[in-house]
């Protein structure tokens, strides 16, 4: 066998490795939803409470176990994406005003949103891995194989991203089990249990990729061996050729920190909606208190349902008007929105971005040391950590640039996500708005960075040269300082505008792609976007920082010539890829509009039948319903819970822990 054959063999397929399973799966006891602290599985069969409330149930959501009772579960058929009539308006559909039923559609909505979030989280990891693998290219694969064959290491291909496909398929099947117009408790319980297992399995697999990317990448990448450079110049070359390594490390570092906080917020949003009986049952993030006011202003026999609701609306409006929050006001002015009434999801969105910004309670802030206060926290701090892992120690001025751009991007993402919430996903995302937001949050920050640098003699070590190479002579502080003095000019201003425009168009394509897919599937909810937040944030940083760094490097070293020319232009290929992707985005979006989801499902499970070549008539059973991945069923009828269903759920044998002892999300 020749070397070529050996390489081919080393790169060949082989069997897919078995999926990694979580070592253990824990569940955590949480509050009862049945109007009684003794609700759910904690109630014994002979408890007096069960006489009035029925059999004890458990609603499992993101691994949290909430007790309830069977008489609260069933209800007539209603649509869960419009204003649901919970009763008390005089039509008798939901029974008495105090009734706590309609839980079936509420539980189903929670499970569906959980499946959407987990699918978005995993799809994000897959997208980052795919981008990085494709950037490495076939040459990198061959070099790894040759290195292995010649004893140079590189034989281990690392974790297999195909493992994510299996989890996505399982999540889709779990969501499909409840995506039906007839809701059964046993299906809700099993889906909650299965989704917890799949989330834990994902955690076990994604940790392997975190370990893979959160380590120093291979040295070199330029024409000059790193040993020939020293100090800050070595860092410059490291950054210039590590855009995708840093991008992957940043994503996996941010993801590790923020995913649990996003999941916690989504769980809290679901539980609040159930307890407060939000009448927009599936799109709960977009709920306003005025949604609970009956259109006909009906009252019950006591005449107080509408009055209480209107009072609550007025309370919310007055609360907003009385809060003088300049930051919030400036955001609303920028968005062009006069929003007197809160949406239910606003506070949870604020929590998520507060956590990403590194915010904590007053007590935690006071307990921080002076050193901790000086260091970058939150998501920008995670990006700095990714840089130091991949590139190595950073000079202070580089850290400052990273934090400045990362913080600007975070503020911009906060505004964009607030806009997504207030627009409730009903219309296509406005590309022009995103470009304007990018200019508002990024343009002046980029220019300020360059302007500050023009006044710094960074990279200076006295007046002597930093580096001496044959044919070049000395490259020192004064030469660099003179170049920096001319760094901000009309060409640079134009380049910054181009960077922002391309980056925002790239983001727009991905945001609108996710929104339009969800809209076609009748499943627009904030989980669609929140599951992708770490990816979109890391992507925006990559698309803005590295082109800016390209300007800095080119201005300082671009005309020196010789071997130092190899450390310039780290981002030209990056922007080229973005341009081609943007050019094709419109065509792709247009073709997606014509896709028939039912035919796609048929082609997946019965390709011969879908092509009219037979096979369809001989199919013994229908393919399993999937969600996400197929249109959501908005109609919901909660079926009465049987004793056999409760026994089946109790036999599931899950380990439930006290949440006070373990707050793992």
Image: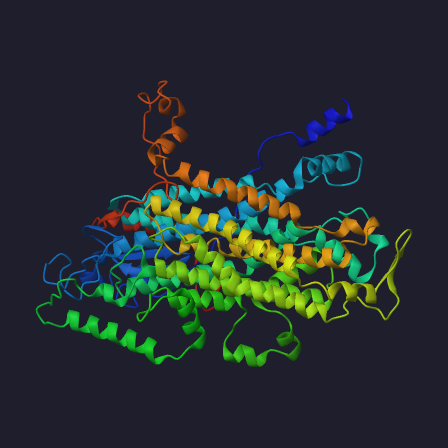
Q: Give how far across and how far down residue 14 sits, in percent.
A: 61, 30
Q: Farthest residue toward the left?
A: 301
Q: Give how far across and how far down residue 152 sits, in percent.
A: 79, 40
Residue at 41% x, 73% y is 329
Which residue is nearer to you in this view: 310 or 565?
A: 565
Q: Give how far across and how far down residue 365 sits, in percent.
A: 55, 78
Residue at 87% x, 69% y is 463
Q: Farthest residue toward the top?
A: 613
Quadrant housing residue 249: bottom right
**Colour theme:** rainbow
Left or right of 437: which side holds 297?
left
The answer to whether residue 50 shows anywhere in this view is yes
Residue at 24% x, 48% y is 636
Q: Farthest residue toward the right?
A: 470
The answer to whether residue 380 shows anywhere in this view is no
Which residue is nearer to you in this view: 136 or 494?
A: 494
Q: Farthest residue toward the front?
A: 490
Compared to 382, does 362 lie above or below? below
What number of labels is visible? 0
Compared to 176, does 429 lie above or below? below
Left or right of 285: which side holds 168?
right
Compared to 370, does 543 lie above or below? above
Left or right of 19: which side holds 425?
left
Q: Give how far across and how far down residue 1 sits, in percent.
A: 76, 22
Compared to 261, does 648 lie above or below? above
Which residue is nearer to you in this view: 190 or 354?
A: 354
């Amino acid at each position: 066998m020749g070397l070529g054959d050996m390489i081919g063999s080393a790169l060949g397929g082989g069997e897919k490795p078995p999926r990694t399973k979580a070592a253990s799966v824990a569940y955590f006891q949480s509050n009862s939803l049945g109007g009684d602290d003794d609700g759910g599985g904690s109630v014994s069969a002979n408890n007096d409470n069960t006489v009035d409330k029925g059999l004890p149930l458990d609603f499992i959501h993101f691994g949290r176990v909430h007790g309830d009772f069977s008489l609260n579960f069933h209800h007539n058929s209603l649509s869960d994406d419009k204003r649901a009539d919970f009763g008390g308006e005089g039509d008798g559909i939901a029974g008495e005003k105090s009734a706590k039923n309609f839980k079936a559609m509420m539980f189903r909505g929670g499970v569906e949103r959980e499946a959407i979030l987990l699918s978005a989280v995993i799809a994000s990891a897959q997208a980052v891995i795919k981008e990085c693998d494709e950037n490495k290219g076939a040459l990198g694969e061959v070099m790894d194989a040759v290195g292995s064959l010649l004893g140079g290491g590189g034989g281990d291909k690392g974790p297999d991203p195909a493992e994510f496909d299996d989890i996505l398929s399982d999540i889709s099947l779990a969501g499909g089990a409840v995506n039906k117009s007839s809701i059964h408790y046993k299906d809700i319980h099993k889906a909650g249990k299965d989704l917890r297992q799949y989330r834990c399995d994902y955690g076990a697999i994604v940790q392997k990729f975190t370990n893979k990317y959160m380590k120093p990448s291979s040295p070199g990448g330029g024409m000059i061996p790193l040993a020939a450079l020293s100090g800050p110049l070595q860092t410059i070359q490291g950054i210039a050729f590590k855009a995708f390594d840093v991008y992957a490390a940043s994503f996996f570092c941010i993801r590790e920190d923020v995913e649990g906080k996003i999941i916690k917020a989504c769980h809290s949003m679901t539980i609040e909606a159930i307890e407060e009986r939000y009448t927009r049952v599936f799109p709960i993030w977009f709920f306003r208190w005025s949604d609970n006011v009956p259109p006909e202003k009906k009252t019950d026999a006591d005449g107080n349902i509408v009055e209480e609701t209107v009072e609550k609306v007025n309370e919310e409006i007055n609360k907003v008007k009385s809060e003088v929050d300049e930051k919030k006001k400036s955001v609303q002015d920028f968005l062009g929105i006069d929003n007197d009434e809160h949406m239910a999801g606003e506070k949870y969105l604020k929590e998520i971005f507060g956590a990403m910004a590194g915010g904590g309670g007053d007590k935690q802030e006071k307990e921080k040391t002076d050193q901790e206060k000086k260091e970058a926290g939150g998501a920008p701090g995670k990006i700095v950590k990714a840089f130091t892992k991949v590139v190595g120690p950073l000079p202070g001025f580089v850290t400052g640039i990273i934090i400045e751009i990362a913080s600007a991007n975070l503020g911009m993402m906060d505004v964009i996500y607030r806009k997504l919430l207030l627009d409730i996903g009903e219309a296509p995302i406005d590309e022009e708005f995103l470009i304007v937001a990018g200019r508002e949050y990024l343009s002046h920050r980029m220019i300020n960075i360059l302007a500050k640098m023009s006044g710094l003699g960074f990279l200076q070590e006295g007046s002597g040269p930093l580096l001496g190479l044959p044919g070049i002579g000395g490259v020192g502080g004064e030469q660099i300082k003179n170049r920096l003095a001319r760094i901000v000019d009309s060409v640079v201003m134009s380049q910054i505008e181009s960077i922002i425009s391309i980056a925002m168009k790239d983001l727009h394509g991905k945001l609108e792609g996710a929104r339009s897919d969800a809209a076609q599937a009748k499943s627009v909810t904030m989980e669609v976007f929140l599951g992708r937040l770490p990816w979109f944030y890391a992507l925006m940083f990559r698309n803005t920082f590295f082109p800016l760094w390209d300007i800095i490097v080119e201005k300082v070293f671009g005309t020196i010539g010789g071997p130092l020319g190899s450390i310039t232009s780290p981002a030209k290929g990056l922007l080229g890829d973005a341009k081609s992707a943007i050019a094709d985005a419109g065509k792709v979006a247009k073709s997606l509009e014509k896709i028939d989801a039912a035919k796609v499902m048929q082609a997946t499970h019965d390709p011969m039948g879908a092509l009219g070549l037979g096979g369809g008539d001989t199919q013994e059973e229908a393919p399993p319903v999937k969600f996400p991945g197929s249109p959501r069923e908005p109609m919901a009828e909660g079926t009465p819970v049987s004793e056999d269903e409760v026994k089946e759920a109790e036999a599931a044998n899950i380990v439930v822990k006290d949440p006070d002892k373990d707050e793992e999300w």
